[in-house]
Amino acid sequence: MPGERLDAQWVRTWREQADAALTKLMQSFLSTHGFPPGLNAVMLASDDSHRATDALVDLTPIPSDLTTLYWVISEASLPDVDNGYFIHSPATVAEHFREYGPAPIDGESIALVFAGDGGGRLLAIGDSGQVWRSTTASWSDDFEVAASSLQEFLEQLGRRIVNQP
């Protein structure tokens, strides 16, 4: 899969499958966990998020797979999947880039933090296409490879949704 570009139709299908799995998960969440779920959703892109994606592209070079992702979905909030997963909106990615700059990952000329987990760890995508996870809840600490591509990362996230008790 390395070297292949993320396909918008694949992202649409992934989003539909994630939405169906989230619907099923939310139906049994209260009885399984004893408390109500938070807002768990993968939001479709809108005209506003498309403008924010264009502004992000104007701000800095971004991996084409991230542009493809943001052309289909604007963000994801999954607080009840594992410790939580959050794909940031393109506007948030741009804001964080202005404030903190790129993630300091050796071997990547630029790496953008585009997501995080409920434990404060950051997820960045490099110009290589790899997805990196911070080893701590910090912008300046080490990052390790989390997935060989954005598609692999989304596949992993989809499995976490489906397998969530």
Image (tube, rainbow, N blue to C red):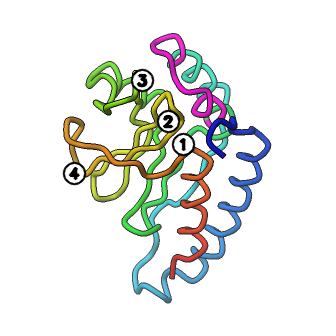
Query: Is residue 43 placed above or below 53 in the rendered structure?
Result: below
Q: Which of marks 3 and 4 is nearer the N terminus?
A: 3
Q: How far apart are marks 3 and 4 (CA)?
A: 22 Å
Q: Which of marks 4 and 2 is nearer the N terminus?
A: 2
Q: What residue type is labelled 2?
A: Ser
Q: Which amino acid does label 3 sit on?
A: Ala
Residue 146, x across and y down, in percent: 43, 52
Query: Is residue 101 placed above or below 35 in the rendered structure?
Result: above
The residue pinned by badge 4 equals 136
Q: Which of marks 2 and 1 is nearer the N terminus?
A: 1
Asked whether disc 4 touches disc 2, contact meaning CB atoms under 8 Å apart, the reply is: no
Residue 127, x across and y down, in percent: 49, 27
Asked whether disc 1 touches disc 3, contact meaning CB atoms under 8 Å apart, the reply is: no
Q: Earlier in the sequence, mark 1 or mark 4?
A: 1
The residue pinned by badge 1 equals 75
Q: Which amino acid does label 1 sit on?
A: Glu
- Comparing marks 1 and 4, which lies closer to the viewer? 4
Asked whether disc 2 touches disc 1, contact meaning CB atoms under 8 Å apart, the reply is: yes
The residue pinned by badge 2 equals 89
Q: How far apart are marks 4 and 2 (CA)?
A: 22 Å
What residue is drawn where x is 45% and y is 32%? 126
Query: Is residue 24 placed above or below 70 in the rendered structure?
Result: below
Asked whether disc 1 touches disc 4, contact meaning CB atoms under 8 Å apart, the reply is: no
Q: Nearer the viewer, residue 134 or 75?
A: 134
What residue is drawn where x is 61% and y is 79%? 27
What residue is drawn where x is 53% and y is 15%? 55
Query: Is residue 20 placed above or below 7 in the rendered structure?
Result: below
Q: Earlier in the sequence, mark 2 or mark 3?
A: 2
Within 10 Å of the Cα at label 3, are there few (<14), some (14-19), or many (20+) other Cα atoms?
many
What residue is drawn where x is 28% and y is 30%? 104
